Image (cartoon, coloured by chain):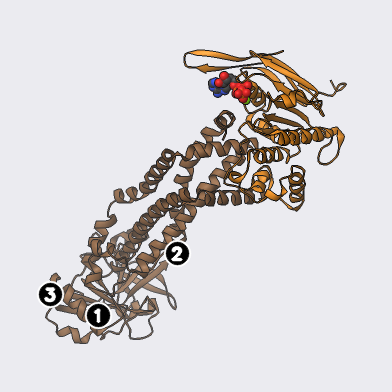
Chain colours: A brown, B orange
Amino acid sequence: MKRFLSLLAFALASLIRRKRRSLSLGFGLLLIAFLLSAALLLHDSIRAEYERLIPGMAELSVHQLRGGRPERIAGDALKELESHPGVRSITPRVWGYLYLPPLSANLTVMAKNGDPALPTILDGTLPDNEGELTIGDRIAHSLGLRPGDSIALPGAAGFQLFTVRGVFTSDSSLLAGDLALFTEKDARSLLGYDDELYTDLAIALSAPSEANAIAARIEKLLPGARIVERSAIERAYALSFGQRAGFLAALLLPILGSFLLIAWDRLSGSSDEERYEAGVLLISGWEFRDILTFRILESSALSGIAAALGISLAYLYLFIFDAPLLADLLLGWSSLHPTFKLTPMLHGSQLLMLVAILVLPFTAISILPAFRSANVDADALLRGGR
Amino acid sequence: MTAEKPKLLEAEGIKQSFVDGAKTVEILHGISLALDRGELVALAGPSGSGKSTLLAILGGLLLPRSGTVRIDGVDMITLRAHHLSRLRREKIGFVIQGLGLLPAMTVLDNIALPLIPSGGAERADLERLNTLLERLEISKLASTRIDKLSGGERQRVAIARALVLDPALLLLDEPTASLDKANAERVLALLTELRQSTSNGQSENRPGILMATHDPRILNSDAVDRVLELREGRLV
Ligand SMILES: Nc1ncnc2c1ncn2[C@@H]1O[C@H](COP(=O)(O)OP(=O)(O)OP(=O)(O)O)[C@@H](O)[C@H]1O
Ligand SMILES: [Mg+2]
């Protein structure tokens, strides 16, 4: 530990000593870190939006926000908008998630309502009475349920028993495979809604081109509301990372970038300096593993600091400053709905992965020369001198 | 086996050659030598005769084409890399011809380099370092950067660094080459003093000193026990 700390201190001092190099390499790494984390964070939060949309077949959905978090909304919050010619209907909805321990998965609980876009029923009917539910075929399959079967669900006030009334197809990309429809009363009691508020308002438009105008109206009527436009999210989702390819490209970026940075670094003569330095350390009684550790610490400290800054900047950029430029480019939101905000999200696993793909390739690539040089150093030093 | 204590340094049949384009140039044709603790031996020879090459081999920095080098009876040539670097750290202090200092660092930081892998300079170490600096008369320069120093001052910094870990064997390559008379004498006096006592004053741990030089001020000095002369790849 003492050895490690003292080598770390030496590595940091060495980074400071070679200020110009550290700054330019660090800047390059920071840029990579920023781009990559912005892309990944955006990807994840768009996906989260997308998933949040799923129960909603609605073209526009309106949430109430409080302190940046979605809250429930009054059913008549947008009564004035009902007469707007662009609006076909406004449906207050009750939905939420229920965790099912045996599946370790969520069930999306939703009250059946007058929403026009009803799923295609495969078998049976929609729930008519309390104690009934109709579920998507995927979850029906994984639970082995058919119409007529019973299931106990862990609701807000304990287990409740339900009978399966029907199964609908969940093939449509707009429907979660884990959706279950209930009567409103059952949905409320499962989710623990003990008041008259709704999860959100689903707005059906008379024409998709009305989205802008309606959003602007909602903005005026309900400042602080969060308006989600289905087509925008879908577009963004498809555009940004619909496919694996985009994701892979994002992973390759830091590796490629590190390669370029290191190639540049070698070309700009720092390998001579490093060989000399390694030779000096060697004759100063350093063992090979000391030199290697020092080099690894130097590279990983540099890329670690750059990664931390890059990730923080990306977070600020996306979630505090609402991604200027990028959002316009990719989503066209900010001009549409000034209050649309991505929900800040950054999980431990995300962070770990980001740090790993930022720090590991650079460190790995940059210690290769250290391996190679350790033997030659002394010889070069003996005759090269200084 | 245990009857006789092995010599500090024993080299036998050292051969070395370098590939220069198409032909192979023989530099050392089978060198054998021995050095004991407390000895101060000079290695003389014209420029290009292979003095630095021989020192590098003796110091474990360069592998000879053939031959053996033993330090306290341990054969260095056949040691695995990490054992060799451990042995070098524990037994050998090396001052190379080009000195090998880090110019952007201070005198004290350069001298403390050998301490870093074992955890850096602690208070006791600092005292030792200060004693060394005083002995080499560079105390005032402790926090001066190397690139601000004169040649003689740099030479002494390099020697101080080689002494930090209390080596049994001190190898010096041209320690007085660029020095004026006063500085050369100062270095020689220091080396003379060194082989008589170590910094901790135990006489059985006195270092053996081998220095490559063609400086007549050293070669003719009484302080030197023996002069080995390297000529055309052989000791004469
Ligand atoms: N790695 C190498 N490759 C090729 N030739 C080398 C190599 N190392 C040393 N030589 C050659 O070996 C010869 C001896 O070099 P060395 O540096 O040992 O001489 P020296 O006696 O120390 O000379 P000086 O007094 O000038 O320091 C020289 O001709 C040198 O060019
Ligand atoms: Mg030489």
Which comes before the other along the chain, label 2 or label 1? Answer: 2
Chain containing the residue with disc 2? A
Residue A146 position by quadrant: bottom left
Chain containing the residue with disc 3? A
How busy is the neighbourhood of tag 3: few (under 14 within 10 Å), some, or many (20 plus)?
A: some
Separation (CA) of disc 2 from disc 1: 40 Å
- Amino acid under disc 3: Ser
Separation (CA) of disc 1 from disc 3: 19 Å
How busy is the neighbourhood of tag 2: few (under 14 within 10 Å), some, or many (20 plus)?
A: few
Name the residue beneath numbered marker 2: A101
Q: Are marks 1 and 3 in contact (CB under 8 Å)?
A: no
- The quarter of the rendering in which ligand 1 is drawn is top right
Residue name at image x 63 percent, y 49 percent: B144
Name the residue beneath numbered marker 1: A219
The picture places residue B70, in percent across and down from the top left corner, at 73, 23
> Mark 2 against mark 1, which lies toward the viewer?
1
Q: On the picture, is A303 further left or further right than B15?
A: left
In the image, residue A196 sits, relative to residue A176, either above or below, namely below
Q: Nearer the viewer, residue A47 or B181?
A: B181
Q: Nearer the viewer, residue B200 or A354?
A: B200
Which comes before the other along the chain, label 1 or label 3? Answer: 3
Which comes before the other along the chain, label 3 or label 2? Answer: 2
Q: Quadrant of the C terminus of chain A?
A: top right
- Amino acid under disc 2: Pro
Q: Is mark 3 within 8 Å of ligand 1?
A: no
The picture places residue B107, in percent across and down from the top left corner, at 65, 46
